[in-house]
Amino acid sequence: MSTERGRIRITGFEAERVEERDSLSDWEAESGTGTESRWRRGLRRFKRNRSAMLGIAIVVVMSLLAILSRPITVGGVLVQPISLAPHAPTDILYLQNPSVGVYDPPSLAYPMGTDGSGRDLFSRLLYGGRFSISIGFIVVALTASFGAVYGAVSGYYGGWVDEVMMRIVDTIFAFPSLILALIIVAILGGGYWQLVLAFTLFGWAGYGRLVRGEVLSIKENEYVLAAKALGAKDRSVIFRHVIPNAMPPLLVLASLNIGTVVIGVAALGFLGLGMPPGTAEWGTMLDATRQTLIQGPGGAIPWWATVYPGLAIFLFVMSMNMIGDGINDALDAQETGVGRGGEE
Amino acid sequence: MAEGHKMKVRDINRRRLLQGMGAAGVAGVAGCLGGNNDEDEDTSSPEVSDREEVDFGNLQAGGTLRGAVGANVNSFDPPYSTDTTSTQAQNFIFEQLITSDRSGNYYPWLAESYELVETQDIDRTAYADYMTSVATDEEGALEIDEQVILQHPEDDPLDSDEVRVITPEQAAAAVDDGTFGMQYRYRLREGVQFHNGEELTAENVTASVERYENSDVSAQTFDSLLHARAVDEYTVDLFAQVPDAEAEGQLPAVYIFTTDQAGLEDGAIDPRQGNEPIGTGPYQFEDFSDEQYYELSKFDEYWTEAMGVDAIDWFDGPEEFPDGPLVDTIEMEIVPDAANRAAALRNDEIDITTGLATDTLDEFNSDDGFTVTGIETGGYEYIQYPVNVEPWGDQRLRAAVNHLVPRENIVQNVLNGWARPAWTPIPELAEESGTADPEALMEELRPYNEYDPERAGELLDEVGEDLGLEYPLEVTLETNADNPDRVQMVELIAESMAQTEYFETSVETYEWNAYTARVLDPEYPDGEIIPCIGLSGTFNPGSFCDALHGTANIGQCCNLTGISDPEFDELVDAARFDIAVVEDEQLRAERYDEIWRLLADRRYSSLTHFDLMTAVSNTAVTGFGIFPFDEGIYSFALYNPTESQTMWLERE
């Protein structure tokens, strides 16, 4: 019996006695509904939040319209054949149809009018969502993931690691985020992935700071101590116990940030630094019509050229903010102004 | 040595790259030839005049003209500035030996008279005996501090360690021995005063020419000028290197400075350097605030007023024509944004401005409170094909793309009719010596330049079959971002190409300075890129072909894609630097016709349209007449006896 040497043997717990004794309470496995998980409760509350659901609906519709606006081919294979937009976003209509002019007002054929190059604004608006919305989601996914890990590591280890990592964040916070994005775009030039990089490279700092603050309190909790006591490695403590519990405020910030990124992309576009000119990105479309806002005497401003792209940006960002607020209420995240300069 | 770099800077200035309206304030926007949105541009007649007819009997002296310009005055020092806004400001203050009317006819100005003394049939090799050898560095830059007046045409600084050149000192020696191409003699007016009281003499002219040595505009000055020599106190000779058909206008294109200022350091004639510019011009410098405004006041001792306009022997205007400009003071605001200038004009903050967006021009034109004045200018825009990158070496491919350039749409839809399609490669103002018969030229060349996707398709199929090309071809079109009209035009061309399914196009834009540096990079012609840029030509027809296609202008302004065609180079040289064309203008015009045919056939670039210069003024401005080049627009309008042009202010 050498294999059993040194093992503690506990006696006195005869199974029958325990099983047969009277129950101490009237609780039974089947009697309750069980503790509702935090996420499930959140989802339930979120569904009851009308403004948040409206936001979701708008975002879903806008995303679907963007996806279905024109066919999508990947590597020569048609993966999305539907084409809701009547014209390609780059189609200059007067080349084919001389009766179309520049800045034609909305009509049945062109429900939102034409822009300064004689392109159909409605088609461009639908298609334009592809840029703004996808950049918003990609940037937030990247920045939130990196920021979460960064903040968790910083908060969890503390000491000089925390000190160094947070000074880096402070340095990033010393610059207005749009200026940093401007610098990157100025160096790399405009374009889709350049914009993603511009907002990603420094955009994670807010998440880092937020998660670090959460982690500082989470790591004092008993379940973290327990996990440590059981010999869990730092990596699994951080990823299995710390980060999941820091998620609610992170989600709130992320959902609000999608709107911020979309506004940022539009701002760069408006400054002529985002996508190449003529791209159907909403901010770039606004930039192209900027000059029309001051007209000569008796001139009418072609309001449709600025109002519709502006409205698209407004609708999307507003919806994202409503969703963010909904998540905040649903998860009791009490998101507390962790952004810089009163941004959030 | 910084010489290599200097060459670049100089040469960009040489033919004034047009950034476009707004930002650089160079002649960007245009006036109206075509009826607005009129589909058939042939039926159009100018809706704006180039001049307001006035009765000199009603003229009023005095008042302040408030204007707005689109760019900062980078320097008040004429040889050290590279943009038209600076030249515009300098033209109030400084003058030259000659002046010109709006058709490019030259008249003596600070010179009372001038004559061509002698023309010798020589070429540049005739100076070989006077040349010295100068070492070159790896990049082909010359290691010499003096101005290189000319270089031996057989020496290539890139291939050899030494090249033979002529410096000002040796040029003087050559002239001493009677070696020169042309000699012009100028008799200066006596009693012309600078703003500081100094009297103009021949020494001022020779010292001023020296100030142009190694300056930012030395290349354009010394491509023809050999030497300046004072004969006596009021007589000066200017010598040309070789017989030059443009010598009459080119040789004396030097602003005259006071003795003190001619000796100042590079770029020092500038209030920012502590030196207020002093010239003989009708207005003297008062105040300048960088990026904000400048102010000028009338010079009381201006020579035409002192002598009376009748003292100018060629003047044949009406009796009531005044002896000098009528406006007392000039205030120019610097407002880069065209929309802001339009707003300032509407709010009565300014009386006049130029370079407004074309879509607002129509509105100003139809409003009684404003006058739009317009004239076809020498400014033009073009795209250039990457001839050194296959398959663009095939001229049929280039001809096909040329058929896809929708020139009428560009003018009607992008520029709202305020320009003229470039059916031929020369504007009206250069037609006199640029073509023997403008109408025949138009008839011959227009079919090459029509928008014709079908013909383009045929050509592309043909090329595709011969070269085994796989369509669509990917190509990038580029231009500067700060000119919205130009960007829109490039987008239109790109879309027109893409719609044929033969091309996959993309458009890239760059900030102006980054863009000019990019297109002048020696590596640039290696890319499969079609650049678009604007250029300001002159009365010289050569300015509409040589800058774009001359081998000497590769990597400089503005042979952007490395076009090298010896046949073309020879033709261009023969159309200017040849004693036969100096003496026979008709022959010169015929030689240019040959060039236009060659270019239409080989199609290295596509000119899209000729700009129309416009100025918008309120009702106070009376008698405004517009000059076809941005740099002379105000100085011409205020006072120019060649066309009895003057203006005044009538405020209610």
Image (tube, coloured by chain):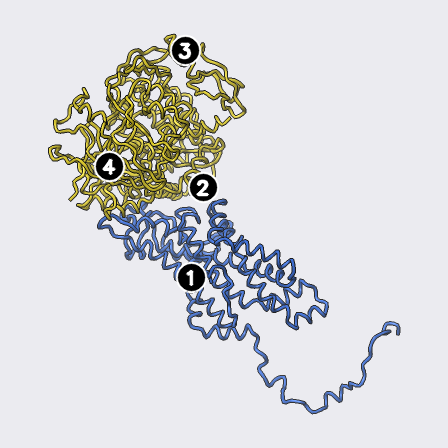
Chain colours: A blue, B yellow
| Residue occupying the point 15% across, 29% down | B321
Q: Left or right of A99: which side holds B124?
A: right
Q: Is residue B504 left or right of residue B234?
A: right
Pointers 3 and 4 in contact (C-beta within 8 Å): no
Q: Chain of mark 4?
A: B
User: Which circle's residue, 3 or 4, is located before the other in the chain?
Assistant: 3
For disc 2, the neighbor class at 10 Å (few under 14, some 14 to 19, many from 20) is few
Which chain hosts label 3? Answer: B
Distance in Å between CA atoms under marks 4 and 2: 60 Å
Residue reaching furthest right? A1
Q: Is residue B271 left or right of residue B30?
A: right
Q: For mark 3, does the 10 Å Cα neighbourhood hold few (<14), some (14 to 19), or many (20 or more) residues? A: some
- Indicate whether B332 appears above or below A133: above
The structure residue drawn at horizontal position 59% and vertical position 61%, both measured from the top left corner, is A151
Mark 4 or mark 2: name the one nearer the start of the chain.
4
Residue under label 1, please give it.
Answer: A317
Q: Which mark is residue B472?
A: 2
The CA distance from mark 4 to mark 1 is 53 Å
Q: Position of residue B493 (x, y in %)?
A: 37, 41
The residue carrying mark 4 is B329
Name the amino acid type tagged 4: Thr
Q: Quadrant of residue B547?
A: top left
Look at the numbered discs 1 and 3 and tell me whether their residues touch, using CB distance below 8 Å. no
What whole-number distance in Å separates the C-alpha atoms at marks 1 and 3? 76 Å
Relative image position of residue B351 (x, y in whole percent): 23, 42
